[in-house]
Image: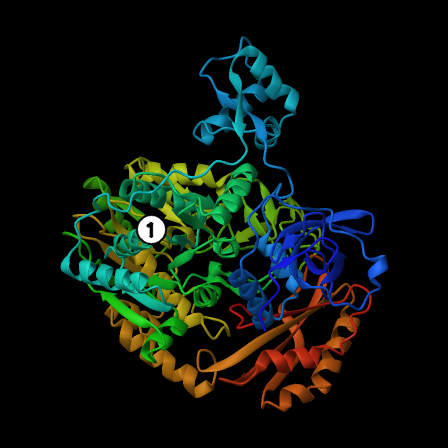
Amino acid sequence: MQEQAFFNEGERVGVLTTQPLDRCLDYRAPEGGCHLGAYVEVPLGPRRVLGVIWGPGAGDFDSAKLRPVNRVLDVAPMRDEMRQFLTKSADYTLTPLPAMLRLATRAPGLSDPVSMRKVLRPTGQMPDRMTDARERVLSAVDEYGGLAFTAKELADLAGVTTSVVKGLVKQGALREEEAPRDLPYPRLDPDLPGKTLTDDQAAAANTLGEGVAGGRYGTTLLKGVTGSGKTEVYLEAVAATLRAGRQALVLLPEIALTAEFLKRVEQRFGATPAEWHSGATMTERRRVWRMVGQGKAQLVIGARSALFLPYQNLGLIIVDEEHDTSYKQDEGVCYNARDMAVLRAAMCSAQVVLASATPSLETWANAEAGKYSRLDLAARFGSAVLPEMRAIDMRAEKLPASTWISPSLKQAMSARMERGEQSLLFLNRRGFAPVTICRACGGHVTCDHCDSRMVEHRFMKRLMCHQCGETKPVPDACPTCQVEGKMAPVGPGIERLGEETAALFPEARIAVLSSDLFASARALKQRIEEIAAGEADIILGTQLVAKGHNFPLLTLVGVIDADLGLQGSDLRAAERTFQLMRQVAGRAGRADRPGEALMQTFQPEHPVIRAILSGDEEAFWRAEAAERQAAGVPPYGRMAGIVLSGPELPAVMDLGMALARNDGPLRQIGAQVFGPAPAPIARIRGRHRVRLLIKASKGTPLQDAIARWIKPARLKGDLRLSVDIDPQNFF
């Protein structure tokens, strides 16, 4: 039966709002009527809230008491495929539909009428008198490359009042302009010449282009060694999409990757595409949302939430570094952007390209099973060759206490400095030291609100909890035994490694790349550009540096602690260590100078370390797949995590025990329930956390069983229950 596409004035309509309700609400269609999918403003109690016309009203409420829709918003209606995508996503992740709608409407000012606005631009003129506040405003403008801002946006960015901004206007340092609130993005030209491709690259690009031209759904794994030109290949698929008159989306795992990537896109297509991520201004986010819905943004470069933009005609989704864990959202709506990209493409007959040098085992298994196509790029682009990889056996190295750079690694770094080349030291630990311990009693400093140790951040001169963000000064006296002068940092963080490196190489220009050392994403981008231009001799980085950066002078990568990810009970520990080590090693030798990767390890005989060094990736995936298959865990089985939390542990544990006892719906499909048990991090932000883990065979209707299982649960007081289908983390 065909859905009703238009509702006349006064007809009963069902409106899905963004409020936490369990159903659509009935209203009367407004004057002039409304289309199915129209974005509307409706009254809810004393408030006005955002909603979407989801279909006819349920009819279970007295029509005489129905309130009318206040107004229809001046934006393109939600397409049928988008409503289907949100519904299927909600069903798969067991998320209430209003929460999915909130994801799809996360743009400010959607209910504002289209109008002109006053924006400010720099004039280049300095004010008569420079104050600290004025300097912060002008620095904020410079940091964003002279973009236009509203007075409030600029004041918020600079941390000043709007009167400071208005004062700069009077002084002539800023000028006011009238501008439309939302402008279409410049047209991209797919027929501009791209880089000359190798035969392998050209063949892969042609295959992807044919898939796009077919106008059908399909998913392809684009597997290529680091530096093999995967980006150039999939940009040709973007070009084919633009020629077909459809929109394209490129998902990147890290905002810091966008600066270099945007330059490459601009070189290829002659204009800058739309950006969607937390580093974009609120004004820009609203513009992207509106223009995407009108088809006036051909290409979007974005973070995982860009999947939920209202595309008019989406034809291609690229998931770059598809293995990256940042594609999984673990709070609020728990979803994996890689999997949701495949679902979204199936809804709108689009192509998906999953690009990675080290694909996730799930993607590798789907390609092996024939569900996904696979294209391989086995060689680096141009004259670049893959780096030589060697292990440094730390059992044979003589290191002074509280140092972490081995003599062998130091010697290799010295040789690079003499040749004017760059070295990279990789340590996946933020801060100065992971633990601060009392040498008198052995106690360590923990967070007051979480069951986690506080990490010293020396640049802040404070301890920080990496779970809740709480900070406190480094204590002079031990909080446990009150003895003074005995608190000591234990273990290395990236800041401590920086101190050691500066002591070993006092003449070196050292750059530290860690997400918490930069005030904004744009400041981080700027530093990465400086490093690529040769303004550093030694780079120190956390996992941020493993993601797609291209430093032409970098010829040596030293991994300080290659064993760091091998411990623990995470079923993906081996896979993640393998991916991270191969990715970070791939930063070396990406230009015409040969590269080398040295891994400091106390376990050179470990199977994962041996697999990394051998370079036989297929053998590693086959062995890892065999182990997972034998254990019946993903991707050869299904899992779901249940996290219960509350301010009082007994109440949380009682709820967990009640769920475990009443597991009938799960036993009916042959699923097992493990737990309840305290989560590895048992308290975060003052809330006690208890986990249950569900394991089932592949192909079982797990979501339906879980929905029936948790439905009777009574969440009294401040108790919360969250479901994570296909969990990636078990903390």
* Crowd band around label 1 with a 10 angstrom C-alpha radius: few (<14), some (14–19), many (20+): many
State the quadrant of the C terminus: bottom right
Q: Amino acid at mark 1?
A: Leu
Count up the numbered dots. Answer: 1
Query: Is 565 left or right of 506, judged from the image as shown?
Result: right
Which of 215 and 140 lies nearest the eye of the viewer?
215
Q: In the rendering, at what x and y percent does residue 154 appear?
A: 57, 28
Query: What colouring style does the render use?
Result: rainbow
Q: Is residue 149 above or below residue 426?
A: above
Q: Is residue 396 visible?
A: no
Mark 1 residue element: helix
The residue sitting at 51% across, 39% down in the picture is 284
Q: Is residue 108 above or below residue 176?
A: below
Q: Is residue 132 visible?
A: yes
Residue extending farthest to the top is: 128
Residue 21, quarter of picture: bottom right
Q: In the rendering, at what x and y percent does residue 39 appear?
A: 63, 51
State the quadrant of the N terminus: bottom right
Query: Is 350 left or right of 568, judged from the image as shown?
Result: left
Q: Is residue 56 above or below residue 447?
A: below
Q: In the rendering, at what x and y percent does residue 280 appear?
A: 50, 41
The residue sitting at 69% across, 89% down in the picture is 664
User: Mark 1 sits on what residue?
Assistant: 242
Which of 521 and 701 lies nearest the eye of the viewer?
701
Residue 378, quarter of picture: bottom left
Query: Is 567 left or right of 83, judged from the image as shown?
Result: left
